[in-house]
Amino acid sequence: MTKPTNNGQAHDGAWWRPDRHADRRPALLARNRMMAAMRGWFAAEDFIEADVPALQVSPGNETHLHAFAATMIGNDGAGKPMYLHTSPEFTAKKLLAAGEDRLVCFSRVYRNRERGPLHHPEFTMVEWYRAHAPYERLFADCQALLALAAKAAGTEMFSWRGSTCDPFAPLKRLSVAEAFEHHAGIDLLATIDKDGEGDREALAARLLKAGLRHGPDDSWSDMFSYVLVEKVEPELGHGAATVLDAYPACEAALARKSETDPRISERFELYVCGVELANGFGELTDADEQRRRFVADMAEKQRIYGETYPIDEDFLDALNIMPPASGIALGFDRLAMLATGARRIEDVLWAPVAGQ
């Protein structure tokens, strides 16, 4: 008979049960091999690995990311609000400004309101930057790392919920506009003006014509995200990994606009088996434009969630001397899932965060 806890609940399903750990251990060992192989690959590519602090003045300023708040107590006993970072991006870019040329971070990051088969409140992000390199250079990095991860895990095929993907196959590449047209029958670029701003009514009309729902209070961004999640993402990364490229400029976050079309940006995401695996940018280095985006995103966050996060002024100062660069963040735990065929992200974490 299993001994109950103090609140009367049994420990039968706990990750630390010997039988449960024995089931998970092969995937955990594969995870370790993948991590070691990736570190070796970055070292061979002349990257410097940086260990950056998780505690930050700002956790990031994207509308739909939610942080963990903390209080830092000084020697005088006074408290200062701080946050656990949602990405090592701000610190990494400060290091680029300081003079680093090829930089990689294997960072634990923290995101609130996120827990499920593909999400965990604390997870590992591999984020790397190449100064003076076009963002397309990151495609080749992704190709190499997918193959490397498969070899380290001892598999020839990635899998997730019945879908398979050959990690050794050449990447597929299509633009967001092409994906919307093909998978949803929507001419997305026709809903974006010459300055890169989305036209809500134009997109709403196209959703209606395509037989897709939208709410009366949905913004252009809300409708874009709905179509992306419901119609586009599930179709990507089957058979071979897919690079979804040329995001709309109004969804650029920290990416620079395209030099050839101001309606789109140098942003892409990598998909495997319908799972978003990585998010890459040709990095924005215009501090004034970045401030404008942060302010707009925080206004939207206040409207939707009733909260905002501070802007890291030190980060904006660093952008003024940061060199042109391309960077990408990859969810390492998701990669481990895909490479081991795990059903849930917690199956490839040595010790999941307690509680639900």
Image (tube, helix red, strand yellow):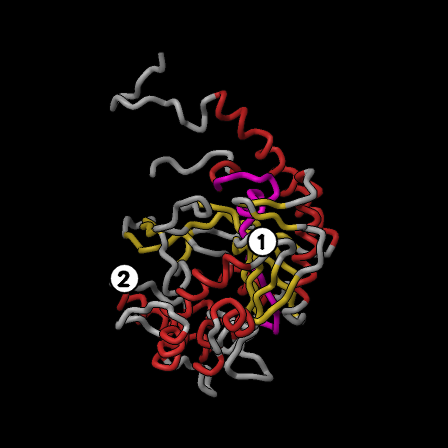
Relative image position of residue 107 (x, y in whole percent): 53, 49
N-terminal of the pair, mark 2 or mark 1, is 1
- For the record, the magenta segment spans 322-344
Secondary-structure class at tag 2: helix
Q: Residue at x 64, y 53 (%)?
A: 239
Relative image position of residue 88 (x, y in whole percent): 50, 56
- Does any portion of residue 352 appear in the rendered image? yes
Q: Residue at x 39, y 73 (%)?
A: 207
Q: Is residue 74 left or right of residue 51?
A: left
The amino acid sitting under disc 1 is Val
Q: Nearer the viewer, mark 2 or mark 1?
A: 1
* Quadrant for the C terminus in the image: top left
Q: Which residue is tagged 2?
A: 305
Front residue of 214/351: it is: 214
Front residue of 35/221: it is: 221
Relative image position of residue 18 (x, y in whole percent): 49, 20
Q: Which residue is tagged 1?
A: 272
The amino acid sitting under disc 2 is Tyr
Q: CA distance from mark 2 to mark 1?
A: 31 Å
Magenta-span inclusion, residue 337: yes
